[in-house]
Amino acid sequence: MAEPPKADIHSRHDKDEDGGAAFVLQSKGEWWHAGFHLTTAIVGPTILTLPYAFRGLGWGLGFLCLTTVGLVTFYSYFLMSKVLDYCEKSGRRHIRFRELAADVLGSGWMFYFVIFIQTAINTGVGVGAILLAGECLQIMYSNISVHGSLKLYHFIAMVTVVMIVLSQLPSFHSLRHINFCSLLFALGYTILVVVACIHAGTSEHAPPRDYSLEPKKSARVFSAFTSLSILAAIFGNGILPEIQATLAPPATGKMVKGLLMCYTAIFVTFYSAAVSGYWVFGNKSNSNILKSLLPDSGPSLAPTWVLGLAIVFVLLQLFAICLVYSQVAYEIMEKKSADVRQGMFSKRNLIPRIILRTIYMICCGVLAAMLPFFGDINGVVGAIGFIPLDFILPMVMYNMTFKPPKSSLTYWVNVSIIVVFTGAGIMGAFSSIRKLVLDANQFKLFSSDVVD
């Protein structure tokens, strides 16, 4: 377990002994590298869940919530980058979310709160990435070998082995080229999925369209808050300070450029995937739109080569996503396990790195195989993880740091966001956990089907 910051967490001695900072969070990157990292952290295959989120909201509320969450998260990340810049100019450069929160809010318990939430988020994303990658392999396999004997957990084991190898890349900065490819993969499979949805919606085998919501009012409310939690998870990014840490100092202003790059990609991919998928499948949208395009019974609703290529792009990007969200776990491990007086690839540091990262990936793989609840996991992680970290804490930290007058628009916008998303988080957590409990009736350990 990492230790809370001492009174002088920036002392030379602490930095000299901090393997997580020296090795995992190397500060060598340019602003576009941060843009690649941010895009990988936000623009991922979870966008294939957007039509599923829309089915709990409908067209109008779906567009409103998607746009609102997008604007609020951009604003939130912008405020956090300003707080980080302010601290750096004050001689207190923070490279970890937990230390930033503990310093700005002046509380030791906040350190443990953030590290708990970050760990839950990053592990949840890692598990979800491995699960979805395994599902991608299963989809390809089932179309090649209709009566094949391999189950979902076999493919999850294959993905885990690949991730064990890739996880040995030593630093966040070393992922910059992989994350650039990740950006290209995201654009690629979004275009392919949109083309596939248009083809499906205009073909003679187009499914009947029904955009009606749940008939019971209570069920409709629960579905709406679950969808809002999913949107929060899709836009969420619980490692923004760690990404800014990879920038070569001074980092001031560079993160905003990275955010603009990221949100340009978000605008192109999120809306096109949401609109095209929900337009075709309506309230029958699957938690993975690719499964809607490849139904268990009946012909494929789009050319097989288009869907196959999209699945390959998704699979390849999932490796990058899992790597990005594993970095916080790795820097926690190496903060104490590594000896910074010896080289990054010295035997003394290489052996513990291989052992600890292998164990971490195996644990994520086992959880993915045991808990195939991709859509539900998104909702729960969004409600209890991303909403506090991305929609509440940045506003609180900005108000604490810059102390805008209570009569100012900024102050009241921040307070309003805090109040609204605190309520949404509570309701979202309740509705997401409720759905998880209801879906438990369909759940079997090491099931070969992902529950929607």
Image (tube, grey):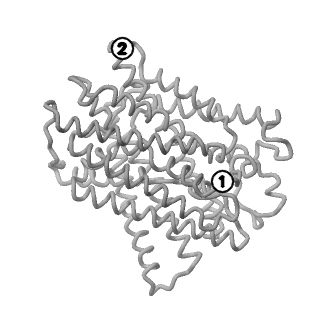
Three-letter amino acid code at the position of disc 1: Gly
Quadrant of the rendered structure where residue 320 is? top right
Q: Residue at x 56, y 53 (%)?
A: 239
Quadrant of the rendered structure where residue 151 is? top left
Pick the residue in front: 58 or 255.
255
303 vs 127, left or right, is left
User: Would residue 117 be seen by someone viewing this image from the given angle?
Assistant: no
User: Would residue 257 be seen by someone viewing this image from the given angle?
Assistant: yes
265 vs 178, left or right, is left
Q: Is residue 87 above or below residue 344?
A: below
Q: Which callout, 1 or 2, points to the residue nearer the camera?
A: 1
Pick the residue in front: 120 or 309.
309
Q: Quadrant of the C terminus?
A: top left
Circle 1 residue: 29
Q: Is residue 329 above or below residue 389?
A: above
Q: Residues within 10 Å of mark 1 (few under 14, many from 20)?
A: many
| Circle 1: element type | loop
Pick the residue in front: 20 or 183.
183
Three-letter amino acid code at the position of disc 2: Ser
Q: Is residue 205 above or below residue 398?
A: above
Give residue 125's position: percent from left, percent from top.
Answer: 49, 43
Q: Residue at x 44, y 43 (%)?
A: 186
Give residue 389's position: percent from left, percent from top.
Answer: 51, 59
Give residue 87's position: percent from left, percent from top.
Answer: 66, 70
What is the distance, in whole Å, between disc 1 and disc 2 at their CAs? Answer: 45 Å
Give residue 295's position: percent from left, percent from top.
Answer: 25, 28
| Circle 2: element type | loop
Q: Is residue 15 above or below residue 342?
A: below
342 vs 96, left or right, is right
Circle 2 residue: 145
